[in-house]
Amino acid sequence: MKFDEFKNQIVLVTGGARGSGSEIVEKFLRLGSKVYSLDKSYKKKISKKKNLIEIKLDVTNLKSLKSIVKLIKKNETKIKCIVNNAGISLPLNSTNPEKYWNLTFDVNVKAAFLLVFYLQNKLKKNYSSVVNITSISSKIAMQKNPAYNSSKAALAALTFSQALDFSKKGIRVNAVCPGYIKTKMTKKSFKNSQQRKVRTSRIMLEKYGETLDVANAVIFLASDNSRYINGEEIVIDGGLIKKGI
């Protein structure tokens, strides 16, 4: 497959400083895109890398989010792709369940909705696409993390809703649904040999995925190679969900 269409195009990636987000950013850069990488861990606004603009942003801070949107609207005429990758998984807080629930939904769902909503006029007809990063946790039960499970299911539903709303403009919205990928979020379970053995035994391919696997799926969905795919999720889980007894 060729991805020449991304050269000199504008791409936004939330949570782009590490894990799958970082890999997605690097993949777009290698294809010649100008990438706005938004992440709360950044300390500088401008990267030394060519075509990469690193912006410190806490996506739950509405004032900051609107400020960044204003900056992008001022500097760019059109956006090729928005990748809503920012996400958190918190331990269930029994002493403050409201904060646990609200923060998870603010990062995983609300920010994805608002970023696309505010920048929708920069998404051009028959040109742009949105890719949301969901999770297999939206489809199968995970212990003691109801907010993460629910928020990722909500993000999947938002994907379908956005796909319908933007379809008249020819703007596609899809999702990548990762399983166990080797990132900071899964580092603890991966290093625990017993946990890793249990988890990989449930996966057809018997191994964790790589961040590149997620990035490759994002590029495909953002490209014209998937021009007739809309409102769908590509599951990247090595066959975990489909494996039987």
Image: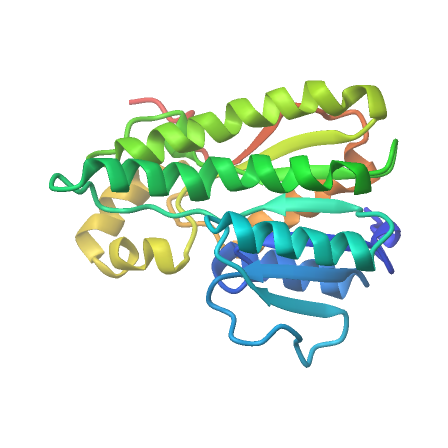
Is residue 237 visible in the rendered structure shown here?
no
Quadrant in which the C terminus is drawn: top left
Give 126 or 214, whichever is nearer the viewer.
126
Q: Position of residue 109 (x, y in %)?
A: 48, 35
Q: Residue at x 71, y 20 (%)?
A: 165
Residue 24: x, y in percent? 62, 56
In the displayed structure, would residue 238 be above or below residue 65? Answer: above
Q: Residue furthest bottom?
A: 48
Colour scheme employed for the rendering of this structure? rainbow
Which residue: 62% across, 72% down?
45
- In this view, the residue in front, 5 or 67, is 67
Q: Residue at x 43, y 26 (%)?
A: 153
Using the image as rendered, state which of residue 15 and residue 243 is in the foreground: 15
Instruction: Using the image, determine if residue 168 lies above or below residue 196.
Output: above
Residue shown at 50% from the left, 51% from the top: 59
Asked where in the image residue 125 lies, by quadrant, the reply is: top right
Q: Is residue 225 above or below residue 10?
A: above
Tally of numbered discs: 0
**Which of the 4 image quadrants contains residue 22?**
bottom right
Q: Position of residue 91 (x, y in %)?
A: 22, 46
Task: State whether residue 41 is above or below residue 193.
Answer: below
Residue 27: in sight, yes or no? yes
Residue 148, position as x, y percentages in the image: 34, 36
> Residue at the left extreme?
95
Side of 162 where 17 appears, left or right: left
Q: Is residue 52 left or right of residue 2?
A: left
176 relative to 31 in the view: left or right: left
